[in-house]
Structures are given as structure tokens and as C-alpha cells.
Image (cartoon, rainbow, N blue to C red):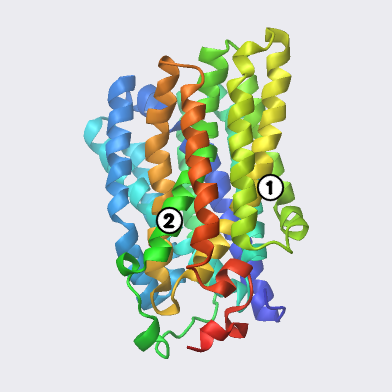
């Protein structure tokens, strides 16, 4: 990132705002369904269905958010996303049945999709010229640490106080969104990239950009591993292997600690590698993680907790290789004139992975190894596709060089 006083202020304000945002989200987002059941009073099946419908409604947002980013710049769109999420959290406080729960879920989902569709463009603008791997890694570390802190506060204090604690969590989450919006609007003023010079040659639409569509598809295949860990590990540990109830929480906390402390170290360690090469190594690690996890039921019961924790460290290492590079690759590969639309479309990789994950987890009812086989197969396809894809993406994006220094950038 640039080292001017204004750039330093932008960077600090952005990190503080995102930290506040994610602390509040950690308090409440993991408890959406629990809140709908315990506070609103919906049956579990109905609560899950209503929130899922609201979440799916948010999938229509990224194309519109991307266009707004290209027209206005990312900062107003990120601020709008915070206001939408604040409205959604506030609506949950008022919810007393299906209708308001659905409205709250839709507002929250629309805000989240708008946020992720514009966040990485804002981080790139604050970072200034040059590769964005480190700025994205630092932002990821801050967000992960603060989300985990919020989740720990919820586990330690708020949930224990029952319905009142859940309402407090929602209220604090709404305030955190508003506070983040104010900080971003008042203190973050990055210079906006002027795409008018490039518009004639660089205004490639997403649907016509086949290499970028392939990048979205490959990213989805690799993102399955992390989503599967988050959703599937508790089911695998508690229902399949009859493990201790504390183990899923410890594993998630371990992943959070590694992600929030080691991303920049992973970047330094792999700085000599192309982005796609680092991602391929991460995919191979995901494959190994799946294989080792599938062996867990064959181990003695006493050895399983230690085995799960060790495999969690392996997954964390793979996620560092993959996660610290993928967003920087997507940002660099996006045409400048339509960067907002490309980065918004890129978020579908993670959204689709999240939608597919519950169906994969459900296969534990059939077999203890089938879900791991599917995730490993997806990672295998992704690892095999990345070297081929790298030949069709801009060389500066693949290698992590500044666009301005690339010969391709001059054309």
C-alpha cells in the first residue's frame, strides 16, 4: 500500500471498519437459525427454510452491485451494503413471525452479497498500484480474527443468557454495521481508478470472458473444501465418529487462529511462486486432507480427537496457500473498465460452493467417506485445471506482477 499520510489513514480506517463489521457478524451470523427458533418462535424446519429462501434471494444482487462499483466506485457500494445489513439485523429484532423473518433474511443476504461484490475493489483502491496479495491477506487476517472474537464472546456470554442474550447479539451486530458505514464514509477516501482511457479495448463483459468464467468455476471447486470443513466437520465428528462435543469448536478456533496470524507469513514463504502454482499446491493439500479425514473412523476412539486437530492444521495450510492468492488473482485478471462486474461475478464461486456444501454433507447419511471423496475429486479437477487456465489469463495476473509493468498492459 502507498505510504503517504492519506493512504495510511485510509488503510487504518478500512481495517478498523472491517474489524468492527466482522466482530458484530461473529456475534450473530452463526446464530441466525437459533435466533429464529428461540426468539421468533419458528419451528426448526420452517426457520431453516425461511432463512434459506432469504439467502437465495441475495444471489440476484452481485450483477447490479458490480455495475454500481464500475459507475460510482466501490466505497459508496460497500457503505450501502453496511446499511442494508444493519436494516436486516434491525428487522430481526422486530420479527415476530414468518414474514418479518423472511424480510430480515433478504435484507441481510442482499447486504452480504453487495458487501462481497464490492469489498475487494475497495481494498484494491486503498492499496493503490501494484499486486494486491498482501493487502488482501492483511484484510483477511483482521476479518478472521474479529469474526472469531465475536463468536467467542457469543459462546462465552451472550448465548448463556438466553433470549435476552440473543437480542443483544442482534442489536450489537446492527450497531456494528452502522459504525462501519460511518467510518468508511468519513475516513476512507481512496483515489478512484479512471477507466475511461481503457473503455474502448478493456470493456469485456463477464459472460464473454471465458478465461475468467473458468477461473470462477475452478475457484468454486477449490472453495468447496473450506465450506465443507465449516459445515461438515461438526456432523462428521459428532454424528459419524461419535467424537467429543468440544472438538468441532476447537477445530474451528484453530483454523481461525492460523488464518488470522499466518497469512502474511504464507505470502512471504511462497513469494517466488506464481499465484496459480500456490493455489495448485493448496488444492493438493485439500486432497490429502480429505484422504486423511476419511481414515478417521478406522482409528481407535482415543486417537481420533488428536487426528482431527492435526488434519485441521493441514487444511489450514492448504487454505493459506489458496486463500491468500485467489482474490488477488481475480482482481488482477479483471479488465479495468469492468472490474466491478468481474469481481462481483467472482463471488459466485464462493456462493455456489456454499449452496452445494449442505447437499454434500447430507451424504454422510449414506457413507462416512463419500463426502470426502466428492470434495477431493473437486479439488483434483481444480488442481489439474489451474496450469491450463494460467496460460489463458494475463501473465501479470498469474505471476503477481504490477499491471503497469506488463507488456500486455500496454495493448
| 242 w.r.t. 108: above or below | above
SS assignment at label 1 = helix
Question: Callout 1: 10 Å neighbours few (<14), some, many (20+)?
Answer: many
Judge by depth and name the residue closer to the eye, 42 or 382.
382
Regarding residue 156, the answer to whether it shows in the image is no
> Count of labels shown?
2
Judge by depth and name the residue closer to the eye, 86 or 266.
266
Regarding residue 333, the answer to whether it shows in the image is yes
Judge by depth and name the residue closer to the eye, 124 or 298.
298
In whole angstroms, how far apart are the C-alphas of marks 2 and 1? 25 Å
- Residue 64 is tagged as none
Question: Callout 2: 10 Å neighbours few (<14), some, many (20+)?
Answer: many
Which residue lies at the image location 27% right of the left edge and 46% below the top edge? 57
323 horizontally vs 339: left or right: right
SS assignment at label 2 = helix
Upstream in the sequence, badge 2 or badge 1? 2
* Residue 242: % across, % down: 57, 10
Which residue lies at the image location 45% right of the left edge and 78% below the top edge? 336
Q: Residue extending furthest left?
A: 99
Q: Are marks 2 and 1 in contact (CB under 8 Å)?
A: no
344 horizontally vs 325: left or right: left
Which residue lies at the image location 48% right of the left edge and 51% below the top edge? 219
Pick the quarter of the image with the N terminus: bottom right
Which picture quadrant has residue 84?
A: bottom left
- The mark lying in front, picked from 2 and 1, is 2
| 131 w.r.t. 373: above or below | below
* Residue 236: % across, % down: 53, 20
Judge by depth and name the residue closer to the eye, 110 or 347.
347
- Residue 260 is tagged as 1
Q: Say which residue label 2 marks.
A: 216
Amino acid at each position: 500500500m502507498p505510504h503517504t499520510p492519506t493512504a495510511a489513514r485510509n488503510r487504518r480506517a478500512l481495517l478498523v471498519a472491517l474489524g468492527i463489521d466482522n466482530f458484530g457478524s461473529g456475534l450473530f451470523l452463526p446464530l441466525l437459525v437459533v435466533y429464529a427458533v428461540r426468539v421468533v418462535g419458528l419451528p426448526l424446519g420452517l426457520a431453516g427454510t425461511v432463512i434459506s429462501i432469504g439467502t437465495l434471494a441475495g444471489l440476484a444482487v452481485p450483477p447490479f452491485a458490480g455495475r454500481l462499483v464500475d459507475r460510482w466506485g466501490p466505497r459508496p457500494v460497500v457503505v450501502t451494503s453496511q446499511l442494508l445489513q444493519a436494516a436486516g439485523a434491525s428487522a430481526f429484532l422486530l420479527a415476530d413471525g414468518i414474514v418479518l423473518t423472511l424480510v430480515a433474511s433478504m435484507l441481510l443476504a442482499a447486504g452480504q452479497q453487495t458487501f462481497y461484490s464490492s469489498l475487494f475493489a475497495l481494498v484494491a483502491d486503498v492499496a493503490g498500484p501494484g499486486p494486491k496479495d498482501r493487502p488482501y491477506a492483511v484484510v483477511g487476517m483482521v476479518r478472521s480474527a474479529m469474526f472469531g472474537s465475536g463468536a467467542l464472546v457469543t459462546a462465552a456470554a451472550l448465548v448463556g443468557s438466553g433470549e435476552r442474550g440473543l437480542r443483544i447479539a442482534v442489536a450489537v451486530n446492527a450497531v456494528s454495521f452502522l459504525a462501519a458505514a460511518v467510518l468508511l464514509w468519513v475516513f476512507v477516501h481512496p483515489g478512484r481508478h479512471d477507466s475511461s482511457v481503457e473503455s474502448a479495448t478493456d470493456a469485456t463483459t463477464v459472460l464473454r470472458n471465458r478465461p475468467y468464467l473458468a477461473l470462477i468455476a475452478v475457484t468454486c471447486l477449490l472453495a468447496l473444501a473450506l465450506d465443507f470443513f465449516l459445515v461438515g466437520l461438526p456432523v462428521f465428528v459428532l454424528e459419524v465418529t461419535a467424537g467429543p462435543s468440544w472438538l468441532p469448536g476447537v477445530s474451528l478456533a484453530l483454523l481461525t487462529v492460523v488464518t488470522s496470524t499466518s497469512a502474511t507469513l504464507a505470502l512471504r514463504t511462497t513469494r517466488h511462486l506464481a499465484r496459480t502454482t500456490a493455489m495448485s499446491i493448496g488444492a493438493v493439500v485439500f486432497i490429502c486432507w480429505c484422504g486423511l479425514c476419511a481414515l478417521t473412523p478406522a482409528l481407535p476412539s482415543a486417537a481420533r480427537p488428536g487426528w482431527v486437530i492435526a488434519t485441521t492444521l493441514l487444511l489450514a495450510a492448504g487454505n493459506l496457500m489458496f486463500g491468500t492468492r485467489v482474490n488477488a488473482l481475480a482482481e488482477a485478471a479483471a479488465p479495468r473498465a469492468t472490474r466491478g462486474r468481474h469481481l462481483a461475478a467472482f463471488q459466485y464461486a464462493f456462493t455456489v460452493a456454499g449452496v452445494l456444501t449442505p447437499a454434500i454433507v447430507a451424504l454422510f447419511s449414506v457413507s462416512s467417506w463419500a463426502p470426502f471423496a466428492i470434495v477431493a475429486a473437486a479439488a483434483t479437477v481444480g488442481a489439474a485445471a489451474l496450469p491450463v487456465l494460467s496460460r489463458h489469463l494475463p501473465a501479470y495476473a498469474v505471476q503477481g506482477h504490477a499491471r503497469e509493468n506488463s507488456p500486455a498492459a500496454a495493448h
